[in-house]
Image (cartoon, rainbow, N blue to C red):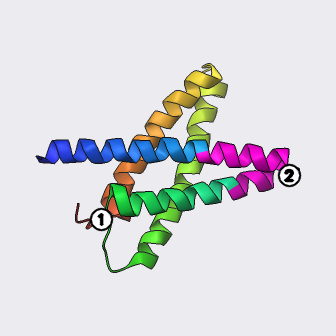
């Protein structure tokens, strides 16, 4: 495979992991919330579990990271996901409250923007030096 097709294939795998983690997050949240957990606690737990799952799939399957410094990579991944959450919230707020877009349209646009940024930061900062 040439560079472009390798990158496209990696991006598709990254997107698949993202979709599955989003579903995991929502399912865990709804189960915990329906079981009586306070919704903020349910959100923290579901987000944390899906972020861990995302790290495992991204490091082993998408980027096939084999670097020596796993602690640094893990910390970078956590920082990136906190940044992604903040960025996602800001973009969604601007699109819906300031530009008056429909919430679902805003969510779709926000997800696409953050997914691309998240992929690029994962590739060039979090999992830099990958062997795949």
| Identity of the residue drawn at 11% across and 46% down | 2
**Does dot 1 land on a helix, a strand or a loop?**
loop
Specify the label residue 110 is tagged with: none
Queried whether the magenta region covers residue 49, the answer comes back as: no
Residue indicated by mark 2 = 38
| Identity of the residue drawn at 56% across and 22% down | 105
Q: Where is residue 103 in the image (x, y as percent from the top left)?
A: 64, 24
Is residue 66 shown to the viewer in this render? Answer: yes
Where, by quadrant of the figure, is residue 93 drawn?
top right
The answer to which of 53 and 124 lies nearer the viewer is 53
* Sequence-first disc among 2 and 1: 2
Give neighbour class at mark 1: few <14, some 14-19, many 20+ (Cα, 10 Å).
some
Q: In which quarter of the image is the C terminus?
A: bottom left
In the rendered structure, the answer to whether residue 82 lies left or right of residue 30 reads: left
Q: Which of marks 2 and 1 is in front?
A: 2
Q: Give the range drawn in magenta.
A: 24-45
Q: Where is residue 38 in the image (x, y as percent from the top left)?
A: 86, 52
């Amino acid at each position: 495979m040439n560079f472009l097709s390798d990158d496209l294939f990696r991006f598709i795998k990254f997107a698949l992991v993202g979709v599955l983690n989003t579903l995991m997050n929502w399912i865990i949240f709804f189960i915990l919330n329906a079981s009586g957990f306070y919704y903020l606690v349910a959100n923290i737990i579901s987000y944390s579990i899906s972020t861990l799952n995302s790290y495992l799939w991204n490091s082993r399957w998408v980027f096939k990271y084999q670097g020596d410094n796993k602690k640094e990579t893990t910390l970078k991944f956590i920082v990136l996901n906190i940044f992604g959450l903040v960025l996602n919230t800001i973009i969604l707020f601007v699109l819906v409250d300031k530009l008056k877009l429909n919430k679902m349209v805003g969510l779709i646009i926000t997800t696409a923007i953050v997914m691309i940024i998240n992929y690029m930061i994962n590739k060039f900062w979090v999992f830099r030096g990958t062997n795949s």
